[in-house]
Amino acid sequence: MALPTPTATRPWPEQVLDQLQSAGPPLVWVVVLAFVFIECAFLVGLFLPGDSLLVTAGIVLAAQVGGGQAWALAAAATVVAISGNQVGYRIGRRAGGRVLTRQGGKVLTRANMVRASALMERHGFWAVVLARWIPWVRTLAPMLAGAAQLDARRFTLASALGAVAWVPTLVLLGYYGAGFLDRLPWLLPTSVAVLTTLVLLGTVVGLLRYRRELRRPVEDDPVAVPSLPGHDYL
């Protein structure tokens, strides 16, 4: 009788998938919910790979459990995304226009802040909705909306619409897209391993960039608070 192949000699994508399966769905839930909240609430979220994480989570769940888990995670992450935006909004209201840019920065630059502020000035309510699909604007939009005194109820509605369109789309894209990957035995574990590695590397690199960014001196002339369309104010 042939002996089973030792785990150490199996291809590395299958080893990664085995590790994720042994950790189980709770690990996926904790990581996804924590990342989504941080990305939607705090400046460090500018540097986190939120989109790729949601897609990867859907693929990992497809390899572990049924569709109920993917739908439940999508619903929970949507609520967390809305909650995170509320924190960012409150930070912006309290800090006013002092969303600080950094001299010589790569992300917290005056140019990026001006672009985000201009988007808010042109579209107000809809800028918050659309910002979900623009990684770095996704984090800045709630703060700028709070600083500009966007009506709290309108902001909550815009945040909810954006979250409902953003989170489930990416999680379920990963989950149902995994069905196509599963047609070839090697493709699903390889995809999971590659995407997981990219998310981990993206997180480490992002945190290092965030630390470097905060060490740079603050711009002397802060970007002005956006001027919203009249119906968006309190």
Image (cartoon, rainbow, N blue to C red):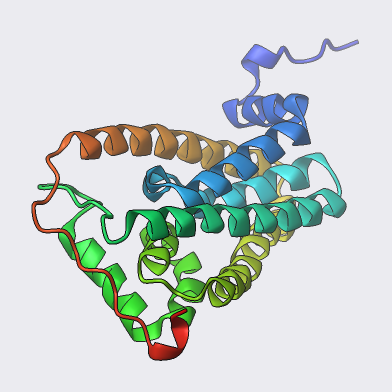
Q: Is residue 232 left or right of residue 1?
A: left
Give the answer, above or below, for where 116 lies relative to 44.
below
Q: Is residue 195 left or right of residue 106?
A: right
Task: Name the image quarter holding residue 163.
Answer: bottom right
Q: Is residue 187 left or right of residue 132?
A: right
Q: Which residue is at the far bottom?
A: 230
Residue displayed at 52% across by 52% down: 87
Location of the N terminus (image quadrant): top right
Residue displayed at 24% across by 37% down: 214
Residue displayed at 45% across by 62% down: 142
Residue displayed at 75% across by 58% down: 75
Q: Is residue 176 left or right of residue 118?
A: right
Q: Position of residue 13 (x, y in %)?
A: 60, 32
5 or 172: nearer the eye?
172
Q: Position of residue 226 (x, y in %)?
A: 29, 74
Count of numbered badges drawn on the protein: 0
208 or 65: nearer the eye?
208
Q: Position of residue 53 (x, y in %)?
A: 55, 47
Q: Position of residue 212 (x, y in %)?
A: 22, 34
Give the answer, above or below, for where 77 lies relative to 168.
above
Give the answer, above or below, for where 4 lies relative to 168.
above
